[in-house]
Amino acid sequence: MPSGIGPVANPKPDSSSKPASEPEALESSRLIKRHSLGTRLWHWTNFLCLIVLLMSGLQIFNAHPALYWGEQSGFSDPFIAIHAQAGNDGEQRGVVRVAGYTIDTTGVLGLSDDNGQLSQRAFPRWATLPGDKWLTMGRNWHFLAGWIFAPSVVAYLLYTVISRRRRGSIFPTWRQLRAIPRTIVDHARFRFHHEADYNGIQKLTYVLVLFVLLPMMILTGLTMSPLINASWPLLTELFGGRQSARTLHFICAFSLVGFFFVHIALVLVSGVFNNLRSMVTGRYRITESPAGPVNREDSHE
Amino acid sequence: MSKPESSGPNRSRRRLLSGMAALGAGSLLAGCDRITDNASVRRTLGSVEQLTYKAQRLIASRQALAQEFDKSQIAPVFRPNGTTNPQEDYYRTWVENDFADWQLTIDGLVEQPTTLSLAELGAMPSRTQITRHDCVEGWSCIGQWTGVPLADLLDRVRPRDQARFVVFHCADHTYGGSDLYYESLDMVEAYHPQTILAYGLNDAALPVANGAPLRLRAERQLGYKQAKYVMRVELVDSFKNIHGGKGGYWEDRGYDWWAGI
């Protein structure tokens, strides 16, 4: 391991404390190994896959930029539609129609700059993969990334459920759940505790992302296949029909985008270097409360 | 935040990490577009299709039936796509005569090539199914199809052992181009009980917009497989001598031959 990363205090006997060769400095903080190599590889692989899946997904969406509820497409009455239409002045405007409301989104959605001229496309050139309108290539990228993403999510979730240690680091304890109001207040004051364990909000978020959003992405994605629909009709039925499943696929994708932005914001404000280091090298600096070290071997049982 | 992190070695490490992250994100966005243009990358992306094809054949039952729906779920208008009104002279003549002198040819790697009129097809045992059409673009539409099971037609012409694919040749030049539309299925989908050559839509004769007089319905495949204006069914062992050699009009233009997703 790289030496000289930082000081180690509190060198009590502990299997995961740093070698004594590291310089002594601050009394109340030390480095711990937070993320295993497997977790870090998984995190960055998924990061790449999700960006490719999102952008190629927007390319696919652009081929028919409307979403519906139910089994089939009620073309005259979509739940969401993104398109271009003539405004009051006769000029083309890009609009998003959601449940009866129309929002002018010219420049970004519906009508946007495409190599120097305004063109009709739901999502703009910079958001899709490839940039050109090219459904075939969008599908190819989507399936390539999907074939890496889905097996890695399934393997990771199985491991998380099977491994007691991983269960402990993902599922919140009662104590952590009860502490959530306090955690919210602390976050609102930009007071972040750098502890070995995640807090209740973090854990609930990870449970939601790992066990709801990611599986939903995979399962609703599978129902886009007519052959899978024929083989597993209950799956499509569970989502309320094929077009509902497509809409849910879209909603879950944008929920993940929302998670991404909150995640990035919290990484930035709670110590970007420490956080990035922990996801690259695995090492994370924790600070300990004056009352004594945080029990980082919290058993969660 | 603890002080030591802003000391010498950590600062450069910090810069390195942030630099790597920024570089990674930036080059990913710009890079994907650039490498999409690379031929070998396109081949790699295309080979994912083979993985999907084999995986779907593995997990999906060969005989699993596509969901069939209630009459009340039939869409008021079945959305036509692709060619909706062929302008070829021979086709216009067929329409004027109500397809009385139209004939379907079945040939290729078969023991007994044959031709059938619309009346002869109509006299064969038929299958009616209310199914959902899923377009590659993302929309779906429910319609009721009536036609002859392809398996019955294949039994009549008796495919030879070498036959691996069924090719459907169409009457229309898509988007007025020089190539006729065509599509193909493997023998598993060809013999599937819901794979029919349909001459009826929603209890009426198949309209011109939807592929009159005869179109393919392969209910476990995406919409571009559902060839309209079918005039010839050919059994082959490979696609190499047919048009662009990829097994279909859109396939020749980059679409996956396997349209199971």
Image: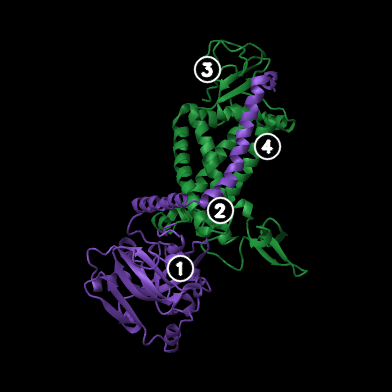
Chain colours: A green, B purple
Q: Chain of mark 4?
A: A
- Indicate which label's residue lies in the foreground, 2 or 1: 2
- To which residue does mark 3 refer? A16
Q: Are marks 4 and 1 on the same chain?
A: no
Q: Secondary structure at mark 3?
A: loop
**Relative to B9, is B74 on the left or the right?**
left
Q: Which mark is residue A265?
A: 4
Amino acid type of the residue that numbered disc 4 sits on in the rendered structure: Ala
Rendered location of residue A88, percent (x, y): 77, 69
**Relative to A290, is A230 on the left or the right?**
left
> Label 3 vs label 4: CA separation?
29 Å
- Indicate which label's residue lies in the foreground, 2 or 3: 2
From this view, report whether residue A162 is shown above or below residue B57.
above
> Disc 3, disc 4: CB below 8 Å?
no
Q: Secondary structure at mark 4?
A: helix
> Label 2 vs label 4: CA separation?
28 Å
- To which residue does mark 1 refer? B70
> Disc 1, disc 3: CB below 8 Å?
no
Quadrant hosting residue B131: bottom left
> Label 2 vs label 3: CA separation?
46 Å
